[in-house]
Image (spheres, rainbow, N blue to C red):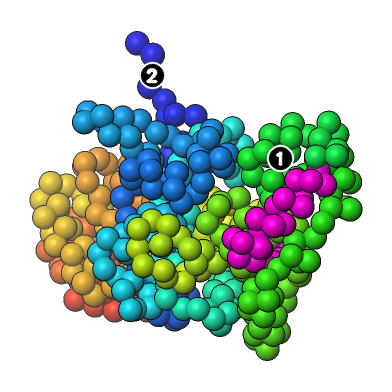
Amino acid sequence: MAKIQAIRGMNDILPEQTPVWQYLESTVRGVLAQYGYQEIRMPIVEQTDLFKRSIGEVTDIVEKEMYTFEDRNGDSLTLRPEGTAGCVRAAEEHGLLFNQTRRLWYTGPMFRHERPQKGRYRQFHQIGVECFGMDGPDIDAELLILTSRLWKALGLSTHTRLEINSIGTSEARKVYRQALVDYLSQFKEDLDADSQRRLATNPLRILDSKDQATRKILENAPSLDDYLDEESREHFDRLKSLLDAAGVTYTVNPALVRGLDYYGKTVFEWITESLGAQGTVCAGGRYDGLVEQLGGKPTRAVGFAMGVERLILLLETLNLIPESVNSDADVYVTAMGDNAVASAMALAENLRTALPGKTVITHCGGGSFKSQMKKADRSGARYAVILGDNEIENGTAGLKPLRAAEDQREVGQAELASVLADALKH
């Protein structure tokens, strides 16, 4: 019988890998807590219409990438391809937005059916941040300042750069969209296939085409900046002055647009060149119309999402994961003989109480002294505690260093925790 394997592009995260995930997640959690952001957790399955109405029916995500199915009641459901729409739905459904400001964040898996490649998967993970009820550019600036702080905490400041742009209001974009279509239509046959298709569906996405021939045509295309409304221009100018005052370096990229229909005014991307080809590790912007679009009262909003897999790949590539981030144990307690098992388990419990934050593994399954010590060594523990009949009778325990060229010694069980606490400091 053939073995069942994971679905292509949906990967297991193994015990050797999870400490790095926990390190990234805890670092992000700590930075967001400093700014007063609260965690929200949404389901991974939503009604399909939520994404059609928010992302846009003519986007690549909705047209080609969503995992959509009918449940037993005949309802159309979709595995979430991104988190913003679900966060808006949850916040509106539970009355979190009415006459309130909110700073929310979430993390979890997202799903898109696209070609799996390094750093891009069909089940991938994002950390998302969403802010509601704040109108001015100060909250846009705060998001970028806190992200800059996160890069410092992770050691990534010199490996990421910020690009920003304003795409104006929906009314301004409609006028610009027509000017762009009129211009590009003259060169339709020379555009790449994706851009030809987008010309009729989502022409602003052509601006970030990577095709060299299309990029050449775009050099003389109308600029979105020339079509910006005054309100968006003032908002963007104020955002730039706030970033300047905070010392956050950025580049204005007039060709930067976001692939989802709900964005307006501020858009931004944090980019790295440290993974070979240019890659986006964090992106977002304003979406002031989305709450109303999904049935709520008009609510200003801005947010971003960062790709967890890509950030972990970046940390690993640059060797920026601290040595302390590992799954190794600190202490491995062995029991020599059946009579010692209960005493070893009790001793291990006492050590866990006395050494909070330290990992104490109790050997289970029996075996010879040699086999137990092999397992102690494989655990990565720094010390093995050895308990047999003689030690129980004398009220002692053997303490054997496993990572240093030091001799085993006998330690009184009453003093063992304090001896280990001191030893594990170094």
- Of callouts 1 and 2, which one flags the residue occurring earlier in the amino acid sequence? 2
Up-down relation of residue 229 to residue 307 (above or below): below
Up-down relation of residue 3 to residue 271 (above or below): above
Identify which amino acid the numbered label 2 is placed on.
Answer: Lys
The magenta span reads: 155-184
Q: CA distance from mark 1 to mark 2?
A: 45 Å
Is residue 248 toward the left or the right of residue 322 in the image?
right
Q: Nearer the viewer, residue 143 or 403?
A: 143
Q: Secondary structure at mark 2?
A: loop
Identify which amino acid the numbered label 1 is placed on.
Answer: Leu
Residue at image location 22% in from the left, 58% down from the top:
387
Residue at image location 71% in from the left, 68% down from the top:
228
Instruction: Answer whether residue 423 is magenta in the image.
Output: no
Tell me if mark 2 has few (under 14), some (14-19) or many (20+) residues whose alpha carbon lies within 10 angstroms of its own.
few
Is residue 19 toward the left or the right of residue 343 in the image?
right
Identify the disc placed on residue 290. Answer: none
Residue labelled with disc 2? 3
Q: Main secondary structure of the magenta part?
A: helix
Percent of width and height locating residue 364:
22, 46
Is residue 65 toward the left or the right of residue 199 in the image?
left
Residue labelled with disc 1? 199
Percent of width and height locating residue 10:
46, 36
User: Which quadrant: the N terminus?
Assistant: top left
Q: Secondary structure at mark 1?
A: helix
